[in-house]
Amino acid sequence: MKAKPGNVCVKITSDGPITTYQSSLLTVQVNTKVGQITFLDSQGNVLLKEGGYTFSVITDGPDKGRFKVSQEFALEKEEPVYGVGLLQNGKMNQRGEHRLMIQSNLEDYAHFFLIY
């Protein structure tokens, strides 16, 4: 059975640098000054919150002129992290791993992750 898209009523409000998008089930807060996004359930509980990030230009080597990006998320103390692609490290849970996410013939990255 195919899911059919439906209409969702979304209320949009702004308060300083925070723009809030709220439906009956989900609230998304975007800090437009720093680009931080927070997802909350209908009760106001945080589902996922971005932490810090860095975005800098690579100044030497073969990747000169390209960008190095780092992004962090605030997770629960014991929350596992699954996804990020096909990795050859023998682990399902990637929490605590530091990975240089570049494609290679041994590792294939999908730039998203799942939290259960």
Image (cartoon, rainbow, N blue to C red):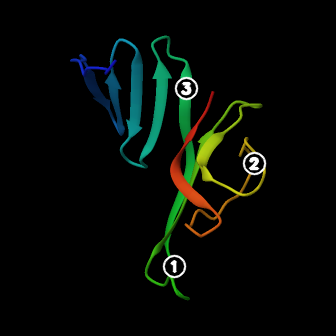
Q: Position of residue 108 (x, y in %)?
A: 57, 59
Q: Position of residue 74 (x, y in %)?
A: 63, 38
Q: Determine which of the numbered discs, if any, sits on residue 47 in the image.
A: 3
Residue 95 location, quadrant: top right
Q: Secondary structure at mark 2?
A: loop
The quadrant the C terminus occupies is top right
Q: CA distance from mark 1 to mark 3?
A: 33 Å
> Circle 2 sits on which residue?
96
**Marked residue nearer the N-terminal end (3 or 2):** 3
Whether the residues at callouts 1 and 2 have beta carbons within 8 Å, the answer is no
Q: CA distance from mark 1 to mark 2?
A: 25 Å
Q: Left or right: 51 with respect to 33? A: right
Disc 3 residue type (three-letter): Leu
Q: Secondary structure at mark 3?
A: strand
**Marked residue nearer the N-terminal end (1 or 3):** 3
Whether the residues at callouts 1 and 3 have beta carbons within 8 Å, the answer is no
